[in-house]
Image (spheres, helix red, strand yellow):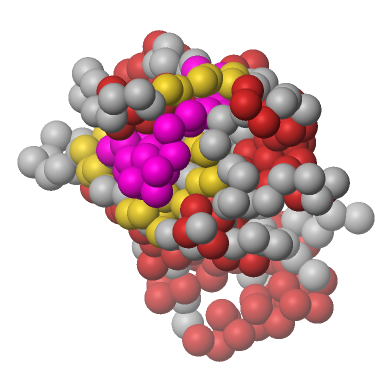
Amino acid sequence: MVVSVRDVAAAASVSVGTVSNVLNRPEKVSPATVERVTQAIEELGFVRNDAARQLRAGRSRSVALIVLDAGNPFFAEVARGAEDRAAESGMSVLLGNSDERSDREDAYLELFREQRVNGVLVTPVDRDLERLARLQSGGVPVVLVDHEDSERAFGSVSVDDVEGGYLAVSHLLSTGRRRIAFIGGPRSLRQVADRLEGARRAVAEVPGATLEVIEMSALSVLQGREAGELLRGRAAADRPDAVFAANDLLAVGALQAFTLMADLQVPRDIALIGYDDIDFASATVVPLSSIRQPAHLIGYTAVDLLLKDIEDPEGDHDRTVRFQPELVVRESTAG
C-alpha cells in the first residue's frame, strides 16, 4: 500500500498543507510540529513523490548525460566527473547509453524531455544536430561532450582529436615504422573522423609512409580483435608494421589477436597505440601506449557549462572548451 501525504497528515493530526510545509519549507513550521510530522513519516514509511513535485514546479533537480558506450571506461570516467560537479550544486545525473545508435539517442532525448531535466549533456552519434537544436529551442540547455560544434550553436567540451591522431601516428613514425594501419569505428562519429585526419597529416609529412584505413562497425574490444585477426592472417610483407587504434578498446582487442597464437610480438613485429588512456591500458599483457584525454575533467567541465547556461542563458561566459591530448608511451611502441 502506498502511503500518501493525507495518511501522514492524519497520523500527525495536522493538515495536508502542514505536511507539505514540513517537506518543502520547514522553517515555516514550529519545531514541535516538524518533529511530530517527521515521526509519522518514519513510522508509516512515507516516500515523497519527487516526480510529481518536479512537474508542478516545471523543472527537476537532475541533468541528463547520454554517452556513446556506457561500458567504455572513458565514458564511465566522464560520468564520474559530471556527477561530482552536479553534486556540488545539489543535483543528480541521469545516464543514458545510446550504444552508438541514433534511434536510442532519440529515445533518451524524448524521455529526458518528459522528465523535465534541467539540461542535457550528450555525445552525439552523428553530425546531424537538428534534434538537439529542437530540444534547446524548447528551453532545455544542451552541452556537447567530447564533441565540438563548428557552428557554435551549443556549448561544448572536447579534446583536439585531430592533434591527438597526429600525435599518435607521429610517434609511430618516430620509431621507424612506415606502414601504418588505422583501426577505427564508423567515420560518422566525429571523434573517429578527426583522429583519422590527424593520422593522415602525420603520414603526409614523412616520405614513403603509408596509411591503411580499416573501418569497423563499433569501437569495441570484439571489433578490435576482429581487425587484429584480419591483419595477423596476412603475410608478413603485407602486414602493417604499426597500428593506431581509434580508442583503447579497439587496441586491446587487436593486442589479443596479435598475441593469441604467439606468432606476432608487440612491438617487435607490430607496434600498437590506442586512444583515451583508460586505466586498463597500463595493465594489458603488453602495456599500451595511448593518447590521454582528461575524462573526469571533461565531464566536470561539461556540467559546469550547463549550470551556467541554466542560471544565465544570455550570460557572457565561455561556451566552448577544448582540451589538448597527451601522448603516453608504454611498451607497445617502445621496442
Residue stretch rendered in magenta on the structure: 163-187
Instruction: Please tell me whether residue 177 belongs to the stretch shown in magenta.
Output: yes
Q: Quadrant of the N terminus?
A: bottom right
Instruction: Please tell me whether residue 171 belongs to the stretch shown in magenta.
Output: yes
Q: Residue drawn at (52%, 38%), measured in percent from left and top?
A: 242
Q: Is residue 48 above or below residue 189?
A: below
Q: Is 206 left or right of 100, judged from the image as shown?
A: left
Q: Is 140 left or right of 273, judged from the image as shown?
A: left
Q: Is 152 left or right of 212, judged from the image as shown?
A: left
Q: Is residue 281 above or below residue 155?
A: below
Residue at the extreme bottom: 32
Q: Is residue 305 visible?
A: no
Name the one closer to the observer, 323 or 106.
323
Name the one closer to the observer, 287 or 305.
287
Q: Residue drawn at (45%, 23%), measured in percent from left and top?
A: 211
Asked where in the image residue 309 lies, by quadrant, the reply is: top left
Asked where in the image residue 214 lies, by quadrant, the reply is: top right
Q: Is residue 211 visible?
A: yes
Give how far across and how far down residue 91 sits, in percent: 46, 58
Name the one closer to the observer, 131 or 322.
322
Give how far across and how far down residue 247 sits, in percent: 54, 41
Name the one closer to the observer, 208 or 111.
208
Residue at the extreme right: 1
Residue at the extreme front: 237
Q: Residue drawn at (51%, 20%), measured in percent from left and top?
A: 212
Give how far across and how far down residue 266 sits, in percent: 63, 51
Q: Is residue 171 above or below residue 19?
A: above
Q: Is 142 left or right of 30, judged from the image as shown?
A: left
Q: Residue drawn at (58%, 52%), measured in percent from left and top?
A: 267
Q: How many numbered discs, if any?
A: 0
Give how far across and how far down residue 215 sits, in percent: 59, 19
